Amino acid sequence: MSSNFDKIAPFYGFLEGVLFGSRMQRMRCAHLDHMSGRREILLVGEGTGLFLERLLEVNAQAKVTVVEQSEQMMKRAKRRVAEKDLRRVTFRKLSFEKFDSSKRFDAVCTLFFWDCFTQGQIRSMLPLLERHSKRGALWLDVDFFENPHGSTRTGIWHYLLIRFLYGFFGLATGIEARRIVNIEPLAKENGFSRMATTRSDQFPMSARIFKKENPASMAVVSHRNDSQVRVIRNSRNSISQSEPDVQSKIPYSLKDCLMLLSGLPIGLTCGIV
Ligand SMILES: C[S@@+](CC[C@H](N)C(=O)[O-])C[C@H]1O[C@@H](n2cnc3c(N)ncnc32)[C@H](O)[C@@H]1O
């Protein structure tokens, strides 16, 4: 699986800001509180380290292992770690498929990672995630999703955004994936049950918490508007199914559209250079 994010590492944060403002980071951190009591945490495909930085702040005890295949991404992630925290972060520059460790982690985080892979690739990598997770481990997954149930207008905006992202990342990094895979059935096959979901109401991105094996005694589904969070508790203590948001209004403001359009030439330029 030979993608290479080195070339876009210098622009990654800029592009993220232009296209999404702070929304990606807010989504990364939507379930950060679940990570606060965890001792051994694995971050896969961490990129420039924005999440790592916050994680080290909220959890002063955790030992963190970062597996990242891009040297340039990893350099940037290292720079974000304060001197005092360096001893508790292990950086492994390799592709996740080659990762091996005697450690079993009590939390794993994959942030905008699985969207780089095809279903077959994900299917072959998830057993590795499972093997390195303790029983009861939490898995935080934040990613884009493709929304087949949205209103037509929402669907079109989301469709265009996702196609643009795949066009750009396909050119710039060589990823093979061309669409977002619903990882939930694959997670289930590997012994992970979903506990909670948070969705952006404007962008097709969500944050999910899965738990290994131990079917959750508390099922929580939360739908996040960018300004507020609504939490639904399931009184029968079973896992709730959350449906993708169905929105009746255009999800993008004029500003969002301008941001998206201004990202297009930048994306194409980076993809071609
Ligand atoms: C779309 S970026 C996401 C970066 C970051 N996690 C974020 O939230 O923005 C995907 C990241 O996964 C890394 N990556 C891609 N394939 C990988 C693999 N097989 N093993 C480890 N890292 C990989 C890339 O180098 C890149 O940093």
Image: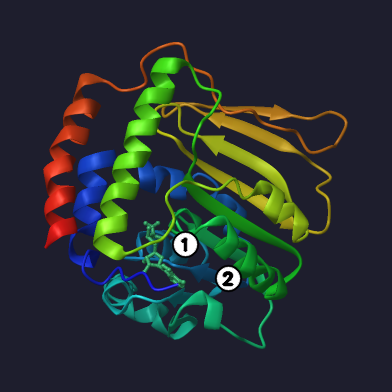
Q: Residue at image x 24%, y 56%?
A: 13
Q: Is the CB atom of the residue marked by disc 1 within 8 angstroms of ligand 1's nearest atom? A: no
- Label count reads 2
Q: Residue at image x 63%, y 68%?
A: 124
* Occupied quadrant, residue 103: bottom right
Disc 2 marks a residue whose amino acid type is Ile
Which circle's residue, 2 or 1, is located before the other in the chain? 2
* Occupied quadrant, residue 78: bottom left
Which label belongs to residue 41? 2
* Occupied quadrant, residue 155: top left
Disc 1 marks a residue whose amino acid type is Leu
Q: Which residue lies furthest to the right in this view?
A: 236
- Left/right of residue 105 with respect to residue 79 in the rendered view: right
- Left/right of residue 231 with respect to residue 147 in the rendered view: right
Return the residue at label 1: 55
Q: Do the residues labelled 2 and 1 touch (CB within 8 Å)?
A: yes
Front residue of 73 and 158 = 158
In the displayed structure, 240 sits above or below 179; it is above
- Left/right of residue 175 with respect to residue 145 in the rendered view: left
